[in-house]
Image (tube, rainbow, N blue to C red):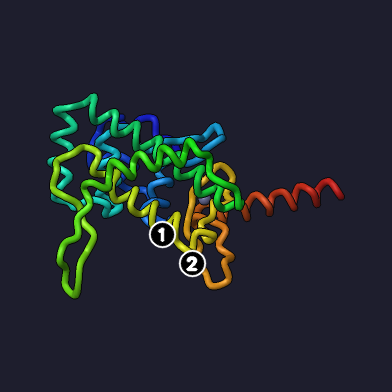
Amino acid sequence: MKTPTEPVATPLPGNRAAVLPLIGGPLCLNFTNTAHGRGTEGHTDNLVDYAALVAWSKHADAIAAGEVERLLATGARHPRAAEAVRRRAAELRERLHRCFLALGRGAKPDPRDLDGINQELAAALPHARLTPEAGGLAWSWDDEPALDRVLWPVVRSATQLLTAPELPRVKQCAGRGCSWLFLDTSKNGSRRWCEMEVCGSRAKARAYYARRKAGAHER
Ligand SMILES: [Zn+2]
């Protein structure tokens, strides 16, 4: 799924980050799905630069549309700081991915991953606010024009899911070379694929041809 002709620094809307299917459920799982094919030759990271990170954040409703321009402008003025945030984002993403996989196996997450996630939590929390909303209060963020504000909602979503009773329903797609995560909300917990039309039908086609080949050998 690599598109090598894509200009790397193009902001909205030329980057694939802004069109990735949001099939994971919670924001933090969709965030882990900004890369795919972990551990395979097809490993692809769609967060190619800070603009791609902002584009995805807008696409996933992690930030308001009105924040995009300001973040891109600040990022353009401070390219090194913006790149540092992109690196932190990619690191956080992989830490979350490993953490969810470990917990899914019933294992403890790597303490280094937990430390890294906790560091991002500590960076995000001072910006958290409660604001009045119709019928009560809502969790929101202060207005600081920080480049890393794109990470705050992801961290919040991750801390929610990592401590939620539905954690065992976080699954990795069974598709070869996929590695996307999703929250299985099916009644009987039988979901296997990120998208049936993508990984599900590919696996079915592979199984079909394997059966045909096996049949040919028998003959
Ligand atoms: Zn998949």
In contact (CB < 8 Å): disc 1 and disc 2: yes
Residue drawn at x 29%, y 44% as measured from the top left? 151
Which residue was labeled with disc 1? Answer: 25
The relative height of residue 202 versus residue 164 in the rendered view (above or below) is above
Task: Tell me the residue that label 2 is attached to.
Answer: 185
- Picture quadrant where residue 120 is located: top left
* Residue 150's disc number: none
The location of residue 215, given as percent across then percent down, is 80, 52
- In the rendered view, tell whether residue 6 sits above or below residue 174: above
Q: Where, by quadrant of the figure, is residue 139 drawn?
A: bottom left
- At a point 17% along the width and 27% down the height, the residue shown is 78
Q: State whether residue 21 appears in this view.
A: no
Q: Earlier in the sequence, mark 1 or mark 2?
A: 1
Q: Residues within 10 Å of mark 2 (few under 14, many from 20)?
A: few
Taking the view exactly as shown, the residue that stands out farthest to the right is 219
Q: Residue 205, percent across and down?
A: 62, 52
Look at the numbered disc 1 and give the secondary structure of its residue. loop
Which kind of residue does numbered mark 2 sit on? Thr
In-front residue for pair 148/185 = 148
Q: Residues within 10 Å of mark 1 (few under 14, many from 20)?
A: some
Amino acid residing under circle 1 = Gly
Q: As drawn, is 67 to the left or to the right of 82?
A: left
Find residue 155 and report its horizontal and vertical position in percent.
34, 48
Q: Nearer the viewer, residue 142 or 177?
A: 142
